C-alpha cells in the first residue's frame, strides 16, 4: 500500500510541475502579446500592449482636414476598442487549449506571476512537508 501511495504522490507531483510549467510559459507568451488596429477610413492606427493599454497612436495628416475634433476622438476610441478586442481574442486563444484548468488566467495578463506563488517543488509549500511525513507513516514534524 505504501508503494502505491508513493507512486500516486509522484504522479501528482509530476502533474503539478507540468501545470506550473504550462502556466509560466503561457504567462510569458501573454506578456509578449500586443495588438494593432486601423480605423475603417484608414485615418487612425493604434497599438495596445499585453495589458490593453494604448502604446501608439498614428493619425494620418488627412484626418485633420477631413474630421472634426469630436469625430477624430471617437475614431481613436473606437479603433482602440478594436485593438483591445483583438488582444482579448488572442489571449483567449492562448488560454483555450488549457481550459478549464487555466480559464481564470485570461484576466491576469503578463504581470501576474503564478510561479512566484507556487514553488517549483510543492514540498516547499508551507505545511505540505508535514503532511507528507505523516502520510508516509512517520510522525508529522513538530511545527
Image (cartoon, helix red, strand yellow):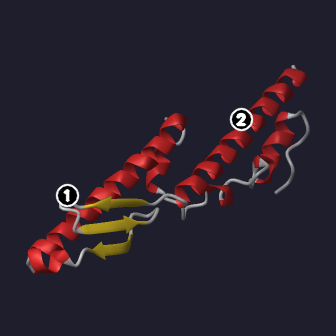
Quadrant of residue 137 in the image? Answer: top right
Left or right of 35? Residue 126 is right
Quarter of the image with the C terminus in it? bottom right
Residue 31 place in picture, x, y as percent: 54, 60
Few, some or many C-alpha atoms within 10 Å of disc 2 (few <14, some 14-19, many ≥20)? few
Residue 40's tag is 1
Left or right of 78? Residue 22 is right
Looking at the rendered structure, the secondary structure element under dot 1 is loop
Quarter of the image with the N terminus in it? top right
Residue 52 place in picture, x, y as percent: 39, 63
Residue drawn at x 64%, y 52% is 24
Q: Is residue 139 above or below residue 84?
A: above
Left or right of 35? Residue 22 is right
Looking at the rendered structure, the secondary structure element under dot 2 is helix
Residue 39 place in picture, x, y as percent: 23, 61
Quadrant of residue 37 in the image? Answer: bottom left
Residue 15's tag is 2
Few, some or many C-alpha atoms within 10 Å of disc 1 (few <14, some 14-19, many ≥20)? few
Residue 107 place in picture, x, y as percent: 43, 54
The one of 126 and 52 positioned closer to us in this rendering = 52
Q: Nearer the viewer, mark 1 or mark 2?
A: 1
Residue drawn at x 85%, y 54% is 142
The one of 131 and 48 positioned closer to us in this rendering = 48
Residue 11's tag is none
Residue drawn at x 82%, y 35% is 135
Residue drawn at x 87%, y 50% is 141
The residues tagged by marks 1 and 2 sit, at their Cα atoms, a distance apart of 47 Å
Q: CB of mark 1 within 8 Å of CB of mark 2?
A: no
Q: Is residue 61 above or below residue 43?
A: below
Amino acid at each position: 500500500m505504501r508503494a502505491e501511495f508513493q507512486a500516486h504522490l509522484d504522479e501528482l507531483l509530476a502533474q503539478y510541475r507540468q501545470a506550473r510549467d504550462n502556466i509560466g510559459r503561457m504567462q510569458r507568451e501573454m506578456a509578449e502579446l500586443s495588438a494593432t488596429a486601423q480605423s475603417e477610413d484608414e485615418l487612425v492606427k493604434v497599438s495596445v500592449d499585453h495589458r490593453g493599454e494604448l502604446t501608439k497612436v498614428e493619425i494620418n495628416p488627412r484626418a485633420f482636414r477631413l474630421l472634426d475634433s469630436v469625430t477624430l476622438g471617437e475614431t481613436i476610441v473606437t479603433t482602440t476598442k478594436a485593438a483591445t478586442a483583438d488582444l482579448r481574442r488572442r489571449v483567449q486563444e492562448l488560454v483555450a487549449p488549457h481550459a478549464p484548468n487555466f480559464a481564470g488566467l485570461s484576466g491576469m495578463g503578463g504581470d501576474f506571476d503564478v510561479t512566484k506563488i507556487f514553488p517549483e517543488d510543492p514540498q516547499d509549500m508551507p505545511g505540505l512537508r508535514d503532511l507528507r511525513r505523516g502520510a508516509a507513516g512517520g510522525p508529522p514534524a513538530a511545527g
